[in-house]
Amino acid sequence: QVQLVESGGGLVQPGGSLRLSCTASGRISHISGMGWYRQAPGKERELVASMMRNGDTRYADFVKGRFTISRDNGKNTAYLQMNSLEPDDTAVYYCYARGLGTSYLYWGQGTQVTVSL
């Protein structure tokens, strides 16, 4: 089992920045990759960014150039640096970890990001 704890959401004005953190515990060696999805009210959950075990990253087109995913292996933590935030970025952001050799996803508790004046 893998447990994920998120932090870092909040209210920010358009153009501002936030950094989300996701700390993993449990069977860390069982993780093949981590990342974030988000879900806005009335919309489906969508992939925002991911980082594989080998460091390869992938971003949704709507965040390219604005968001950066990184990790600190010593702290078992992944980060999502979000810059130039827009009102359309308002959503609950969910950290996930993918089980090694499977399609199974472990989920964090979610953190609210609100971009508004």
Image (cartoon, rainbow, N blue to C red):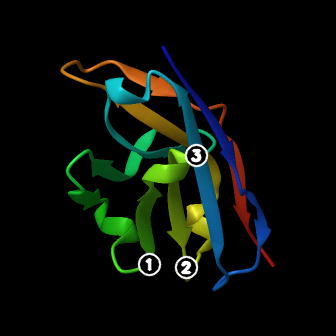
- Occupied quadrant, residue 62: bottom left
Q: Give the vertical position of 84 relative to 59 (above or below).
A: below
Disc 2 marks which residue?
Answer: 83
**Which of the two marks, 3 or 2, is nearer to us in this view?**
3
- x then y, percent, for residue 78: 49, 52
Measured in 3D between alpha carbons, the distance from the residue under mark 2 to the one under mark 1, in whole angstroms, is: 5 Å
Q: Element type at marker 1?
A: loop
User: Of label 3 and label 2, which has the lower sequence position?
Assistant: 3
Q: Residues within 10 Å of mark 1 (few under 14, many from 20)?
A: few
- x then y, percent, for residue 39: 55, 42
Task: Please report the residue visible at 42 percent of the width from the left and 62 percent of the height from the top.
Answer: 70
Q: Are marks 2 and 1 in contact (CB under 8 Å)?
A: yes
Front-most of 17 and 73?
Answer: 73
Tell whether 57 sits left or right of 40. left
Disc 3 marks which residue?
Answer: 22
Q: Residues within 10 Å of mark 3 (few under 14, many from 20)?
A: many
Disc 1 marks which residue?
Answer: 66
Q: Residue furthest top?
A: 1
